[in-house]
Image: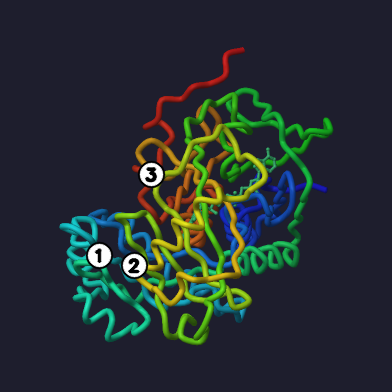
């Protein structure tokens, strides 16, 4: 079995990259140490936020705006919805500097955005009570990305187009010679070879690319799926936005899976060297979620059916992604460190990686994503 490109990591970034390469006629192989998607990976969730608002950072706002047509193109190709644009509501406390900056940036870019008083929010979303909110910024083109559904669709396309998926293959060594990666060795001693390699290993980036010393931080992030105790219909995406309160680092979703909605913590959690199992949140997180809901959607705060989950953020010190060639080789690339913003950008990242592998000039300016901006800490021989 020969392949043009081996992709290490079957999360949303790896499968979006493989999908984009397969569409260009490349014969791809996607391997994952567990499954595709891996239930321990960061992409193994039904819905993730799609946001255009990134404070004053117009670069990411522009990338997000450019990703919308790509999601729409994939929706047409697969006949499935991947992006639900039910809007994102950012609730501001104090001077609301970040939310104010988001409002200004999106307005300057002529993207749709509204600045709302708490009263206007409550008129629109009658279930909300905005105790400590000074104002809110709403962008209607944001919403939710259906991450797991997209991975499944990308995987189907890969299989139909001469590609292969190899779950249960753990790469333990990357071999190189004369400026090229020559093979990957798996944990059973088998060697895998292709012309090109793309590494999309999420929270295992440091481990699999140990010889390169890629400095990323892995942080433990908690979330809770809960069933609204009453009036479930009011919390569907047609009636309810994604909402976030940055001051507490908390965000919430509409009901999106078997009658459950999700709340999560998005500020930087505690660091680990690599994901630690089991992926179960601390009991304290339930109380934190109730307090958050009590302030903003009190009807939801007395939930009794819930299930917790931990995911891992992978981030660089400056928070920007890594989309680049691997240092010192010209046939291997890295797409990693998406922190809290991977799935929303997946089609754009997939397109960019496939342009890099195909030797084309990428449509995205990659200056902020270079590996060379970081101080590498390669393992000493
Ligand atoms: C709590 C939380 C909330 C988030 N919310 C959002 C959000 O709202 N919006 C958004 O866009 N993003 C969000 N993110 C970020 C997003 O989930 C991640 O950035 C994204 O899922 C990363 O995808 P990935 O494909 O890079 O990694 P993963 O999905 O983790 O995939 C990496 C894969 O590589 C495999 N792998 C690793 N090492 C090896 C090896 N040696 N051999 C073989 N396979 C290997 C792993 O098994 C894994 O399956 C959130 C993240 C967290 C933690």
Is disc 3's CB within 8 Å of ligand 1?
no
In screen coordinates, is 32 left or right of 371? right
Ranked by sequence position, the earlier of labels 3 and 2 is 2
> Where is mark 2, residue-wise?
295
> Residue 252, which numbered label?
none
In screen coordinates, is 339 left or right of 203? left
Query: Viewer-proximal residue, 374 or 270?
Result: 270
Element type at marker 3?
loop
Q: Residue at x 47, y 58 (%)?
A: 264
> Where is mark 1, residue-wise?
132
Badge 3: residue crowd in 10 Å (few <14, some 14–19, many ≥20): some
Element type at marker 1?
loop
> Where is mark 3, residue-wise?
320
Q: Quadrant of the C terminus?
A: top right
Q: Residue at x 70, y 51 (%)?
A: 30
In which quarter of the view is residue 243 placed? bottom left
Image location (x, y in percent) of residue 108: 17, 66
In screen coordinates, is 31 left or right of 265? right
Element type at marker 2?
helix
Image location (x, y in percent) of residue 32: 71, 47
In which quarter of the view is residue 154 placed? bottom right
Q: Is residue 205 above or below residue 246?
A: above
- Mark 3 or mark 1, whichever is nearer to me: 1
Ranked by sequence position, the earlier of labels 3 and 1 is 1
- Mark 3 or mark 2, whichever is nearer to me: 2
Image location (x, y in percent) of residue 21: 61, 57
Query: Viewer-proximal residue, 173 or 356?
Result: 173
Q: CB atoms at circles 3 and 2 under 8 Å apart? A: no
């Amino acid at each position: 079995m020969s392949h043009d490109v081996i992709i290490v990591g079957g999360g949303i970034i790896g499968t979006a990259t493989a999908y984009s390469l397969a569409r260009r006629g490349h014969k791809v192989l996607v391997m994952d140490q567990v499954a595709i998607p891996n239930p321990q990976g960061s992409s193994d969730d039904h819905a993730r936020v799609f946001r255009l608002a990134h404070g004053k950072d117009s670069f990411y706002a522009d990338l997000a705006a450019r990703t919308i047509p790509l999601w729409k193109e994939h929706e047409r190709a697969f006949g499935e919805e991947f992006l639900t644009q039910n809007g994102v509501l950012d609730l501001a406390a104090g001077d609301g500097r970040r939310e104010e900056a988001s409002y200004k940036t999106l307005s300057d870019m002529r993207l749709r955005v509204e600045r709302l008083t708490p009263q206007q929010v409550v008129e629109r979303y009658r279930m909300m009570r905005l105790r400590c909110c000074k104002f809110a910024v709403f962008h209607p083109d944001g919403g939710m990305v259906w991450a797991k559904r997209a991975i499944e669709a990308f995987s189907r396309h890969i299989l139909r187009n001469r590609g292969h998926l190899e779950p249960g293959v753990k790469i333990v060594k990357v071999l190189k010679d004369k400026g090229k990666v020559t093979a990957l060795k798996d944990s059973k001693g088998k060697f895998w070879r292709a012309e090109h390699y793309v590494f999309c290993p999420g929270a295992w980036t440091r481990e699999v690319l140990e010889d390169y010393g890629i400095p990323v931080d892995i942080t433990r992030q908690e979330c809770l799926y809960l069933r609204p105790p009453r009036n479930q219909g009011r919390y569907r995406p047609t009636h309810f936005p994604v909402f976030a309160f940055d001051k507490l680092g908390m965000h919430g979703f509409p009901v999106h899976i078997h009658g459950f909605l999700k709340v999560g913590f998005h500020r930087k959690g505690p660091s680990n060297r690599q994901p630690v199992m089991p992926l179960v949140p601390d009991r304290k997180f339930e109380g934190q979620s109730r307090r958050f809901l009590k302030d903003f959607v009190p009807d939801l705060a007395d939930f009794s059916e819930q299930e917790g989950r931990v995911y891992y953020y992978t981030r660089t010190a400056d928070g920007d992604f890594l989309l680049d060639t691997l240092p010192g080789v010209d046939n291997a690339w890295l797409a990693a460190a998406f922190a809290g913003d991977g799935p929303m950008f997946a089609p754009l990242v997939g397109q960019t990686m496939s342009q890099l592998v195909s030797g084309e000039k990428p449509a995205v300016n990659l200056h902020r994503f270079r590996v060379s901006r970081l101080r590498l800490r390669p393992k000493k021989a």
